[in-house]
Image (spheres, rainbow, N blue to C red):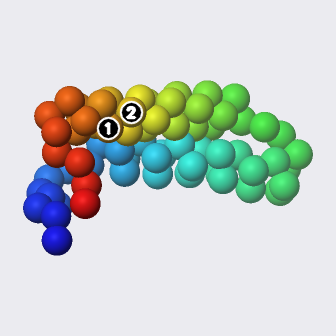
């Protein structure tokens, strides 16, 4: 079993949940009202990009330190 600190705050989870929520809420608003919310679309896009950047940086840092998952 890998040693991983699960008690800390996860920025990756925050960004991914925020991004997907923005797109899902925009879809619901579009279905109910026929209107796309630019705030939700841009917010979801930016949050998902930050989440992907966080995922990529943590992957690169893990590879550089030599601590790969088993």
**Going by the picture, which residue comes out furthest to the right?**
34
Residue 40 visible within the image: yes
Q: Which residue is mark 2?
A: 56
x 62%, y 37%: residue: 40
- In the rendered image, residue 20, in percent from the top left (x then y), is placed at 57, 49
In x, y percent, where is residue 25?
Answer: 65, 51
| Residues at marks 1 and 2 touching, judged by CB atoms closer than 8 Å | yes
Instruction: Inspect this view and state whether residue 54 appears.
Output: no
Task: Give the residue displayed 57% in from the left and 37% down from the top.
Answer: 44
20 w.r.t. 49: above or below: below
Residue 23 position (above or below residue 40): below
| Direction from residue 48 to residue 68 in the image, left or right | left
Label 2: element kind: helix
- Residue that sits furthest to the bottom in the current view: 1
Q: Quadrant of the C terminus?
A: bottom left
Q: Is residue 7 left or right of residue 13?
A: left
Position of the N terminus by quadrant: bottom left
Residue 56 figure quarter: top left
Percent x, y of residue 15: 42, 42
**Residue ID for mark 1:** 59
Q: Residues within 10 Å of mark 1 (few under 14, many from 20)?
A: few
Residues 52 and 34: in front is 52
Q: Nearer the viewer, residue 23 or 3?
A: 3
């Amino acid at each position: 079993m890998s040693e991983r600190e699960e008690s800390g705050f996860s920025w990756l989870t925050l960004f991914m949940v925020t991004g997907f929520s923005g797109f899902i809420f925009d879809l619901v608003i579009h279905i109910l009202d026929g209107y796309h919310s630019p705030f939700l679309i841009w917010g979801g896009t930016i949050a998902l990009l930050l989440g992907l950047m966080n995922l990529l940086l943590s992957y690169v840092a893990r590879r550089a330190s030599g601590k790969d998952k088993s």
